[in-house]
Image (tube, helix red, strand yellow):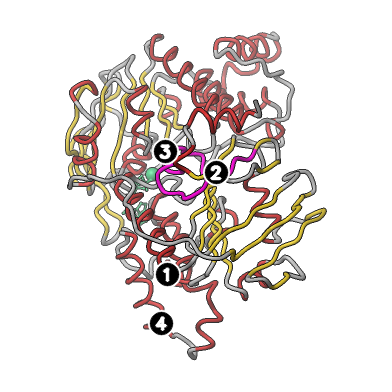
Amino acid sequence: MTHITKRFGETIALADVSLSVQAGEVHALIGENGAGKSTLMKILSGAQRADSGTITFAGQPFAPTSPLDSLRAGIAMIYQELNLAPHLTVEANLMLGREASACGFLTDEIFGGSWSRKCGQTLQRLGLHIPINRIVGKLGVADQQMIEIARALISGARLIIMDEPTSALAQHEVQRLFDIIRQLRNEGIAIVYISHFLEEIEAIADRITILRDGRTIASGPLHRWTRPKIIEAMVGRQVDEMYPRVDHTIGEPLLRVSGLCGRKLPKQVDLVLHRGEILGIAGLVGAGRTEMLRALFGLDPRKQGQATLNGVKISRFGPDVWNAMGVGLLSEDRKGEGLAQNLPCSSNITLSALKKQSIMGWLGRDGERTASIRLARRLNIKWADCGQPVSSLSGGNQQKVALARLLYADADVLLMDEPTRGIDVGAKVDIYRAMGELTQQGKAIVMVSSYLPELMGVCDRIAVMSRGVLSPPYPAEELTSEKIMQMAVGS
Ligand SMILES: Nc1ncnc2c1ncn2[C@@H]1O[C@H](COP(=O)(O)OP(=O)(O)OP(=O)(O)O)[C@@H](O)[C@H]1O
Ligand SMILES: [Mg+2]
């Protein structure tokens, strides 16, 4: 890709970007939120058109006009939000890719029975033991992702783009993905890999390209780079302290939860959250951490369990009750229930705190804007205007809007489910600092995270969820990642 530019109205998403990816390499594309990574890859995969610039693929000029176009040429993109038909079988989903590439040959293959064989072979090639008649929606996220990769292979992809593929994967699933990526690379397939986890980049990439503000900052073999240099190139400044220490004192118990038990998960949760405390919740994906927050917040029904806030018993668990009492939730699912995608960013930020508006009198557009802009500055949100719809922001910036909403609500207790998912390294530091400042004001935070370094870096105490049961909390400095993993797998 050479001299690619792309504008969205006022926003210059890509300004003269060049990228060269070779067969048989894993090429990591990295950069801050809003740097232009997804946009560049959407252009390559035919989902968007560049304003100017040229693409050459396999020695030929290439100007895709649709994703189908790119797929036919051998380029497949795997999005973070997977693109499968959940009610269809594995086999049918694999066929969706095949239809794209060679409608003409399809019938022969199906009636000759070679189609099913081919599906089976492709799954085998990936080391997958999934029956092809299984309904895709019944598979876990990791297996679904594998089916997407299988679909790319079956349609003859020679370049596979993965945009933040590991955000919903457990640790061992990430390892399996990496094994498969290495295998594909050895077969001569090119992989473009987008991630905010530098540990992953270091583990898997052969070469990297760094984007900043829609420009290529650097490109070259990974081994020439150190982590501090990569971070500096990404964010344009040195980051000395990933986990800034904000002095805070832990006070009296604020929230007590006892015997919380959901329909299926969690099975047993007892916790005490103190004023001025950040309590981390570690655990494997699927252990019941999200379910714990949802049951507590009243988004899902619970079998039993009690809670007191400031010594006052909570008679009914429901978002309205909790919000009114000063407890806010940052949901893991920002697409589904987190944000109103078509509303302006500013309304999204101020929406859930209508109470505050009614107390002070209706905020009005101006008040909404001022408050939003203040929070955007604090969290370094990149938007052209706070009036633009949330859906037009980059993934990480959407997550920051969800966080800004929680901060705006000015809750005393903040329940956060994967608050830094999809957020770049520089902005993570801003968020950790903001969390520290909240505890300084005597607020308390429960932080669910699958990223152990951050749990150990920012939390005062950490409890581990294993198969629906929450352990007692341990002071963070007494734990190691090995110990947490042991507790998480229940040994
Ligand atoms: N449909 C759109 N309308 C308006 N602006 C857009 C649109 N899509 C992307 N942008 C803007 O283009 C810029 C680049 O966005 P892009 O999604 O490529 O970033 P990214 O590098 O993938 O970031 P992240 O790490 O947060 O996913 C951002 O400023 C974003 O707001
Ligand atoms: Mg993106």
In the image, what residue type sits under mark 4? Answer: Arg
Q: Which three-letter amino acid code belongs to the residue tagged 1?
A: Gln
Q: Look at the picture and state if 231 lies above or below 295.
A: above
Q: Secondary structure at mark 1?
A: loop
Q: Which residue is mark 3?
A: 453
Disc 3/disc 1 C-alpha distance (Å)? 25 Å
* Tag nearer the camera, 2 or 4: 2
Q: Is residue 441 above or below residue 477?
A: below
**Marks 1 and 3: in contact by CB < 8 Å?**
no
Q: Which residues are magenta?
A: 449-465
Residue placed under numbered mark 4 in the picture: 365
Q: Nearer the viewer, mark 4 or mark 3?
A: 3
- From the image, state whether disc 2 or disc 3 is nearer to you: 2
Quickly name the residue at label 2: 474
Rendered-image quarter of ligand 2: top left
Q: Indicate yes or no whether the magenta region holds residue 462.
A: yes
- Identify the image quadrant of residue 239: top left
- Provide residue 33's location: percent of width, then percent of height: 33, 48
Q: Specify which label sits upstream in the sequence, 1 or 2.
A: 1
**Where 105 falls versus 369 (above or below)?**
above
Compute the Cα span from label 2 to label 4.
Answer: 45 Å
Furthest toward the bottom, the residue is: 361
User: Mark 2 is on which residue type?
Assistant: Tyr
Tell me which amino acid carries mark 3.
Pro
Q: Earlier in the sequence, mark 4 or mark 3?
A: 4
Residue at which label 1 appears: 441
Q: Nearer the viewer, residue 341 or 10?
A: 341
- As measured in the structure, the alpha-carbon distance from the residue carrying label 4 to the one carrying label 3 is 40 Å
Please report whichever mark, 1 or 4, sits nearer to the chain's N-terminal start: 4
Picture coordinates of residue 135, whole percent (x, y) = 73, 30
